[in-house]
Image (tube, rainbow, N blue to C red):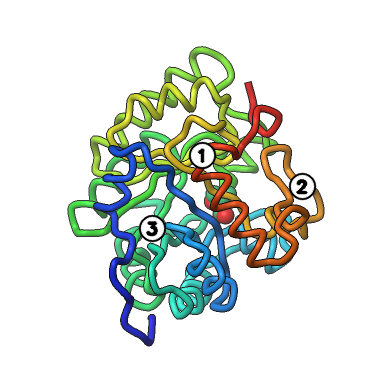
Amino acid sequence: MSSHPRQQPAVTVTRLHAMKEDGERIVMLTAYDASFARVLDAAGVDVVLVGDSLGMVVQGHDSTVPVTVDDMVYHARAVSRGLQRALLLVDMPFMSYAEPRAALANAARLMQEGGAQMVKLEGDALQVDTVRYLSERGIPVCAHLGLTPQYIHKLGGYRVQGRDEDAAAKMLADARALEAAGADLLLLECVPQGLAERITGAMGIPVIGIGAGAACDGQVLVLHDLLGVSPRLPRFARDFLAEGGSIEGAVKAYVDAVRAGAFPAEAESFS
Ligand code: KIV
């Protein structure tokens, strides 16, 4: 856990909800260690996500499936030491939340040992019981819909989700059910921008997009994509290092572009 007291005013769940109300865009970015966490925090990133994408960009696996709770605790603890202001969101890895009691035990580890202030889990309305179980016990939850990388072997590929009307209606219904169960944040990955806009308008909680268009309440990217060091840049990402000139400059350029509604552009979105 963090070895230093956080400066005030730190970003809280209440603050994120107020940002949605005020139409102020939320900036989220992944980090996996203390040094990058410090850079993100200083640049004004609101939410730092220790994503299980670390399985791919740090550990070199070809999916997020091999990532363990121990891995997440290790990286979350490192990131928490670099943060003063940003809220620390940590992914629950594959099968760590398959049923509510196990989810509670693992989320408690992420908070107590890793310093998480919110946990994220993937999946549709089937996760409603788990979200309610965690939320009623004081654990803020971010639900993740659309392309859910932990389901890669069921999905059969990293593809845009919710393109047909039935799938779109189901995603909207799932989002509503997860909010009603107590989710504090919703993340939409690789969703057509029109659908993401509909869902964002229907939710009382903030909606963060990645490959979901500019109408979401905020944006997230994987740090390695933003710095152009991923083997293949996804269409929805932008190499901000090219325009920022340095790591600090790249992160600041991303923060400014999200706040201004200038990222993602049309060409970085799906229809
Ligand atoms: O694991 C991760 O980094 C994520 C992002 C893709 C949002 O979930």
Residue under label 1? 209
- In front of the other: 134 or 205: 205
> Which residue: 59% across, 72% down?
36
Residue occupying image coordinates x 19% and y 58% = 137
Picture quadrant of residue 190: top right
Q: In the rendering, at what x and y percent does residue 170 appear? A: 43, 22
Which amino acid lies under the numbered mark 2 shown in the image of this protein?
Leu
Which quadrant would residue 32 be assigned to in this image?
Answer: bottom right
Upstream in sequence: badge 2 or badge 3 = 3
> What is the number of callouts on the image?
3
Mark 3: amino acid? Val
When the figure is inspected, residue 58 is found, relative to residue 15, above or below; the finding is below
Which residue has dot 2 on it? 233
Residue drawn 29% across and 71% down?
Answer: 8
Quarter of the figure with the C terminus: top right
SS for tag 1?
Answer: strand
Residue hosting label 3: 119
**Relative to 81, 254 lies left or right:** right
Figure check: 170 above or below 18: above
Front of the two marks 2 and 3 = 2
Tell me if mark 2 has few (under 14), some (14-19) or many (20+) residues whose alpha carbon lies within 10 angstroms of its own.
some
The alpha-carbon separation of the residues under discs 2 and 3 comes to: 26 Å
